[in-house]
Image: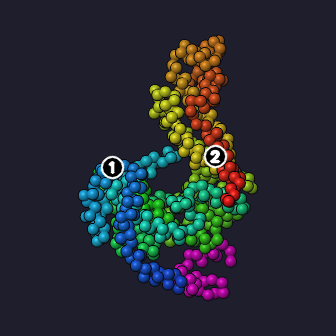
């Protein structure tokens, strides 16, 4: 049986699927049915709302909401105002939750620009009270669902992250699966079908009150410009429950890919499948697109999806080299995004001292290099370091303004008089002078290091040395 036959069988109703020898999957269905009956009889599955409202769980949720901070919702209540409000109103809210009559507030709709600058991404900001309740629900539901998720799912799961997904993807390519089926779900969070999602939640959650509350959160309207926009599908990005709900829905995709024997990595709605040929990739793309439409009612963005070589595609901000043992590297688009953020910091710092601008850049650079520390191609960090130093030198050149001042400052930094005056009166712009030899000699790399500018290359080399030390450190003998 070829892969096309397998795909066609995958699309048949469950009752008509057969296994080797022509026997129907009766045993699997009976086992699933018995498991479902066991879950129905478990008292804790019927009283999850009490677990959500348990004091220890609520205190943990409140701490998380406080640490996340965040903007107020439609009611204008801030995180700081939440605790006094709960002291007065919690008894009533708790009673409504237990009776199943609690009604969530509207979600405040905002739009943020996409990182690539193409369009905007809608976000939903719930009230701090609803964020507290959602966080409490998340803490109860996550241990119920997470153990059953696929080992190839890495997004928003305890003990897993982007770096794990990237290492797995690198391993698939190294094993000879050198074609990637990159599936981009079109407006995933806006197109989640409520009935399909709730049917999958109800497989493990039997508390009718909790199911009713989750449905209300899904259907709560969005306030945009003072107008209440009802929602019949989709789940707002930005709420504590959104990542878990997306994993619950897309877990069926994971299980289907596992059943077919595909190698894949999924992080939230970003899913890559790895195959050995372009023809196989095109078959997988066609059949998985059909599966997503028919079973999960999701659409695939055909313009952004592709079957291509992994080193020609980006995954979680990384790309990789074409070698038989591929090395991870920073994707070009990630470098462009970082430069855009740096330009914004520098633009806001106009008129400030250079030391102040470097202090503003430090947390941004440290976070960026920490995320991309898996990159084995160091040229990107070296070039970024040079670009940042040139941007900072151009700030100084503009701040010095007059040619006489520029000549004086260059001489103070060791440039001889003739060269200083020739450079100061050359009539060129700030960016050209920032890359010229006189500014590189006056404001050297060593000077930036002494002033506290973080070097990306030095920092990533420090990460490499730390990882080598951790691997090579000998075991200590315990007497």
Q: Is residue 193 visible?
A: no
Question: Image point 37% across, 74% down: which residue?
Answer: 47
Name the quarter where the N terminus is drawn.
bottom right
Name the quarter where the C terminus is drawn.
bottom right
Looking at the picture, does residue 408 appear above or below residue 386? above
Q: Nearer the viewer, residue 302 or 243?
A: 243
Query: Which of the 4 quarters of the picture holds residue 438?
Result: top right
Q: Secondary structure at mark 2?
A: helix
Q: Secondary structure at mark 1?
A: helix
Question: Image point 42% across, 51% down: which residue?
Answer: 67
Question: Image point 60% across, 62% down: which residue?
Answer: 265
**Residue 410's x, y, as percent?**
60, 18
Q: Nearer the viewer, residue 4 or 30?
A: 30
Looking at the picture, does residue 109 appear above or below residue 344? below
Looking at the picture, does residue 130 appear above or below residue 6? above
Cβ–Cβ under 8 Å for marks 1 and 2: no
Name the residue beneath numbered marker 2.
Answer: 463
Name the residue beneath numbered marker 1.
Answer: 80
Q: Is residue 84 visible?
A: yes
Indicate which disc residue 330 carries: none
Q: Nearer the viewer, residue 381 or 445?
A: 445
Q: Nearer the viewer, residue 310 or 165?
A: 165
From mark 1 to mark 2, how far is it between C-alphas? 38 Å
Find the magenta span and give its range: 1-29
Question: Image point 58% across, 46% down: which residue?
Answer: 370
Magenta stretch: includes residue 13: yes
The answer to whether 120 appears left or right of 161 in the picture is left
The answer to whether 86 appears left or right of 475 in the picture is left
């Amino acid at each position: 049986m070829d892969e096309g036959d397998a795909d066609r069988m995958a699309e048949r109703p469950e009752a008509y699927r057969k296994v080797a020898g022509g026997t129907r999957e009766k045993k699997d269905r009976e086992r699933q049915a018995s498991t479902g009956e066991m879950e129905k009889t478990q008292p804790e599955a019927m009283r999850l709302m009490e677990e959500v409202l348990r004091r220890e769980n609520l205190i943990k949720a409140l701490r998380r909401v406080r640490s996340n901070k965040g903007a107020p919702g439609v009611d204008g209540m801030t995180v700081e105002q939440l605790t006094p409000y709960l002291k007065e109103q919690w008894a009533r809210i708790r009673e409504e939750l237990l009776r199943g009559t609690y009604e969530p507030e509207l979600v405040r709709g905002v739009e943020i620009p996409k990182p690539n600058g193409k369009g905007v991404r809608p976000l939903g900001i719930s009230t701090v009270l609803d964020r507290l309740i959602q966080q409490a629900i998340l803490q109860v539901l996550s241990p119920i669902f997470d153990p059953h998720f696929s080992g190839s799912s890495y997004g928003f799961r305890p003990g897993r992250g982007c770096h794990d997904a990237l290492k797995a993807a690198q391993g698939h390519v190294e094993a000879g699966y050198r074609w990637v089926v990159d599936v981009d779900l079109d407006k995933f969070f806006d197109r989640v079908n409520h009935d399909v999602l709730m049917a999958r939640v109800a497989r493990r959650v039997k508390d009718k009150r909790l199911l009713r509350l989750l449905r209300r959160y899904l259907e709560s309207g969005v306030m945009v410009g003072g107008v209440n926009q009802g929602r019949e599908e989709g789940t707002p990005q930005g709420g504590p429950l959104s990542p878990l709900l997306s994993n619950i829905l897309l877990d069926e995709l994971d299980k289907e890919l596992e059943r077919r024997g595909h190698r894949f990595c999924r992080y939230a709605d970003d899913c890559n499948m790895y195959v050995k040929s372009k023809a196989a990739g095109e078959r997988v793309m066609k059949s998985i697109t059909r599966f997503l439409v028919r079973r999960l009612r999701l659409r695939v963005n055909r313009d952004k999806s592709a079957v291509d070589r992994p080193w020609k595609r980006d995954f979680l901000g990384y790309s990789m080299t074409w070698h038989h043992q591929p090395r991870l590297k920073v994707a070009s688009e990630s470098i462009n995004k970082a430069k855009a953020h740096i330009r914004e910091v520098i633009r806001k710092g106009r008129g400030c001292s250079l030391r102040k601008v470097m202090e503003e850049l430090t947390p941004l650079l440290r976070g960026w290099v920490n995320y991309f520390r898996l990159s084995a191609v160091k040229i990107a960090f070296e070039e970024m370091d040079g670009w940042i130093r040139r941007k900072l030198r151009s700030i100084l050149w503009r701040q010095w303004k007059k040619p006489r001042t520029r000549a004086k400052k260059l001489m103070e930094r060791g440039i001889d008089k003739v060269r200083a005056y020739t450079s100061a009166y050359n009539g060129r712009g700030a960016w050209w002078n920032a890359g010229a030899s006189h500014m590189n000699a006056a404001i050297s790399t060593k000077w930036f290091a002494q002033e506290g500018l973080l070097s990306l290359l030095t920092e990533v080399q420090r990460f490499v040395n730390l990882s080598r030390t951790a691997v090579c450190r000998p075991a200590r003998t315990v007497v």
